[in-house]
Structures are given as structure tokens and as C-alpha cells.
């Protein structure tokens, strides 16, 4: 699996991941994938789980959103993802089933962050962590930030890098260098 994290900050969104796919081998790879849909919408996924199933699901989402007849609003895109993701990952074995944190933006709306597991597409109001190292990230984040505070990306970044480092040292399924994407 892995550890991915998504943060809502006062000045934007931050997606983070370590860069190792762990299965029969430990291979480096991109775990933050962006798909622009025309010039009016964008989805950026941070992924966990099996690489092939996760990236296939991302492509299925891209084509489903690209083919929408409705206006591409964040809520309409979210509703489409709730339909596409479960179908895309249903045949993957349970322990490697992909999970995602996705940032969705449109030309007319501020970017929003969502946590996706199977058919659940839950809005993130502060932060979320996914993958086998996610429990470590949650504990570290809570020790740094009081829930009433909304930090800036600059303030979150060291905490995020520390959480990734702890996950890489303490979870055998996490490894590789950090990957970051700011929205």
C-alpha cells in the first residue's frame, strides 16, 4: 500500500505521497496523477493500493467526467466518481484495493478535496490520510495542530514531510521519496 495525505489550508490544498509501490517487489513510481478535462475542470488524485487498478480507475474517471453532458461542477464530478470508482476497483483483491484523495477544481469554483474508498466520496474539511501508513500520519498531524486552527501550506509542509518520513521508517509498505502537489 502506501501513505497519501490531503490537506486543506488557508491558502490552498496540498496532496502528498511517498513514492514506492509495494507488492511482490518494491518499485518507485508516481502516486499523484493529474487529469485536466478540457479547459474547465481538473482532477488530481493521490493514490494507494494496486498501481494498475488505481491508474485504470483514474482513467475511467477521466473519461466518465470528460463525457458528462451536465455542466462540470465539483458536485456533478463528485457524483460521477461515486458511480465510476466502485465499478473500476470491484475485481481487485481487498488488501490491494485502491483508495484515493482527490482535488477537484473547475474554472468557476474553488478547488475541493475528497477522500475516496470504494463508493464513498467524502469531502475533507481539514486533512485525511489513506494507506497502510495513514494511521501514523493522523497521529502526527493531530499532535501538531489544534482542530480549531487552519494552517497555511507553508506551515503544513514540514509536518507532512515528517509524517511521510515516519511512515517510511515504520511501515514496511511505505518507501521512496516524497511527492507533493499544491492546488
Image: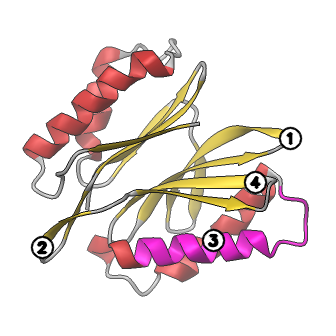
Q: Earlier in the sequence, mark 2 or mark 4?
A: 2
The residue where tag 1 is placed is 108
Q: Position of residue 55 (x, y in %)?
A: 46, 72
Which of the 4 image quadrants contains residue 92?
bottom left
Q: Residues within 10 Å of mark 1 (few under 14, many from 20)?
A: few
Residue 40 numbered mark, or none: none
Q: Quadrant of the C terminus?
A: top right
- Left or right: residue 177 compared with residue 34: left
Q: Earlier in the sequence, mark 2 or mark 3?
A: 2
Q: Residues within 10 Å of mark 4 (few under 14, many from 20)?
A: many
Residue 79, placed above or below residue 97: above
Residue under the image location 58 percent in, 32 percent down: 125
Residue 174, placed above or below residue 168: below
**Which secondary structure dominates the residues rendered in magenta?**
helix
Q: Which residues are magenta?
A: 53-72
Q: CA distance from mark 2 to mark 1?
A: 43 Å
Specify whether residue 61 is painted magenta: yes
Name the mark nearer the viewer: 4 or 3.
Answer: 4
Q: CA distance from mark 4 to mark 3?
A: 13 Å
The residue where tag 2 is placed is 25
Q: Secondary structure at mark 2?
A: loop
Which of the 4 image quadrants contains residue 142?
top left
Q: Earlier in the sequence, mark 4 or mark 3?
A: 4
Q: Secondary structure at mark 1?
A: loop
Q: CA distance from mark 1 to mark 3?
A: 21 Å
The residue where tag 3 is placed is 61
The residue where tag 4 is placed is 41
Q: Nearer the viewer, residue 122 or 45?
A: 45
Amino acid at each position: 500500500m502506501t501513505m497519501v495525505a490531503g490537506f486543506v489550508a488557508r491558502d490552498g490544498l496540498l496532496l502528498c505521497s511517498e513514492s514506492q509501490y509495494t507488492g511482490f517487489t518494491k518499485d518507485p513510481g508516481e502516486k499523484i496523477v493529474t487529469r485536466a478535462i478540457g479547459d474547465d475542470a481538473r482532477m488530481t488524485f493521490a493514490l494507494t493500493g494496486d498501481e494498475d487498478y488505481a491508474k485504470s480507475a483514474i482513467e475511467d474517471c477521466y473519461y466518465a467526467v470528460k463525457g458528462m453532458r451536465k455542466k462540470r461542477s465539483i458536485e456533478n464530478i463528485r457524483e460521477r466518481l461515486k458511480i465510476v470508482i466502485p465499478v473500476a476497483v470491484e475485481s481487485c483483491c481487498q488488501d490491494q484495493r485502491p483508495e484515493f484523495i482527490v482535488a477537484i477544481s473547475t474554472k468557476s469554483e474553488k478547488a475541493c478535496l475528497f477522500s475516496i474508498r470504494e463508493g464513498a466520496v467524502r469531502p475533507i474539511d481539514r486533512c485525511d490520510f489513506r494507506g497502510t501508513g495513514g494511521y501514523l500520519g493522523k497521529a502526527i498531524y493531530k499532535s501538531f495542530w489544534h482542530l480549531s486552527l487552519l494552517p497555511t501550506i507553508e506551515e503544513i509542509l514540514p509536518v507532512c514531510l515528517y509524517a511521510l518520513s515516519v511512515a517510511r521508517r515504520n511501515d514496511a509498505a511505505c518507501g521512496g521519496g516524497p511527492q507533493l502537489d499544491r492546488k
